[in-house]
Image: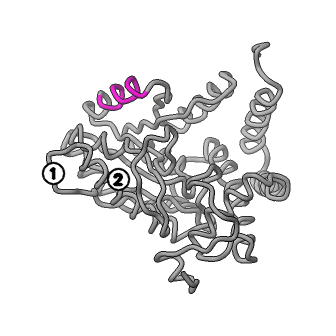
Amino acid sequence: MSRDERASERISYAAFAAAERAAMVLPEFVGRRLFDLAALAAFRLAAGPRAVVADHLRRVLGRPAGSPVVRAATKEAFRSYGRYWYDTFRIRVMPDPEFRSRVRFEGMGNIERALETGRGAVLALPHLGNWDVAGSYVAGTGKSVTAVAELLRPERLFQLFLEHRRALGMGIVPLEDDRGVAEELVRLIGENELIALVADRDLRGRGVEVEMFGETRKMPAGPAMLSLFTGSPLLPAACYDLEDGWLVDIGEPIEIERSGSMRADVTALTRLLAKRFERAISAAPTQWHMFQPAWEPSRAGARATGPAAAAAGASP
């Protein structure tokens, strides 16, 4: 342990390590209940994240942020996130036949056809359901899967997180300098690797403006740029929790007619990807684990517009 660590960083490390051990050691019914109780406590106590999630869900559901519908959905989103953390640790000790029997996988053919070209594939997905399940399942079929990991503090927490992802069978590229990450991903695609990018949050603030749920926000340009630069197909993916397992859906490649302008093509491809994400999130709004702001701050209680609002019967 470094003396430079802040108290909050030591707490983060201890919490991650304790959660990992509890999920892997305790009987499943005990572990699930424990993580659910922790999620409910977070819902009640974490006012900031609760407001962020409510602000997202009011757009998806087409209801005011303070409405009973959005409040109930927000509570369920916290519980879903608690399940995500339990499941991602638990599957490491789950017998492989049991794990694979609990995964319903659709679209494996899209991955296999992409690999047949020898140019790998870029799998782009939102923070939906359990993306670690998807990566571990695909890696278990003998395919090489690499993800990009955001740097965490303290350093030993980041190392613990890397060990966890590698235990699931995935390779990891730390998100350090953009140029180095891009060069490494291009190299891996040249070796026919699958690159999995959770791509519904713009970390750098330099993303592409897209429309989702009737409002403008930014999404990272990385998946589209990587696909266009390497010629690797861009496959949209979505993951969902089921009652006693998980669903992974890999879509067909998203394609555009090249214009000759990389900037224009990246923008067009990213906007198509945003539409796929919008549909995927609409299918299970409370499983969207977006706990950081995805839009610019908005008026509390504002109403959403667009297709999701219309489907929910809200007024524009």
Nearer to the camera, 84 or 258: 258
- The N terminus lies in quadrant: top right
What amino acid type is highlighted by mark number 1?
Answer: Ser
Q: Position of residue 164 (x, y in %)?
A: 60, 34
Nearer to the camera, 36 or 95: 36
Q: Position of residue 48 (x, y in %)?
A: 75, 52
Residue at figure coordinates x 74%, y 70% from the top left: 71
Give the distance between the C-alpha atoms of the residues marked 1 and 2, in whole angstroms.
Answer: 14 Å
In magenta, the rendered stretch is: 178-186
In the picture as drawn, the residue positioned furthest to the top comes out as: 3
Residue at figure coordinates x 37%, y 56% from the top left: 236
First-in-chain label (1 vs 2): 1
Q: Position of residue 237 (x, y in %)?
A: 41, 56
Element under disc 1: loop
Q: Position of residue 174 (x, y in %)?
A: 50, 28
Residue 93 painted magenta: no
List the residue tagged with mark 1: 259
Name the main secondary structure of what is drawn in magenta: helix
List the residue tagged with mark 2: 270
Element under disc 2: helix
What amino acid type is highlighted by mark number 2?
Answer: Thr
Neighbor class of circle 1 (other Cα within 10 Å; few <14, some 14-19, many 20+) is few
Residue 179 painted magenta: yes
- The C terminus lies in quadrant: bottom right
Q: Is residue 1 left or right of residue 272?
A: right
Hey, which quadrant is residue 256 in on the image?
bottom left
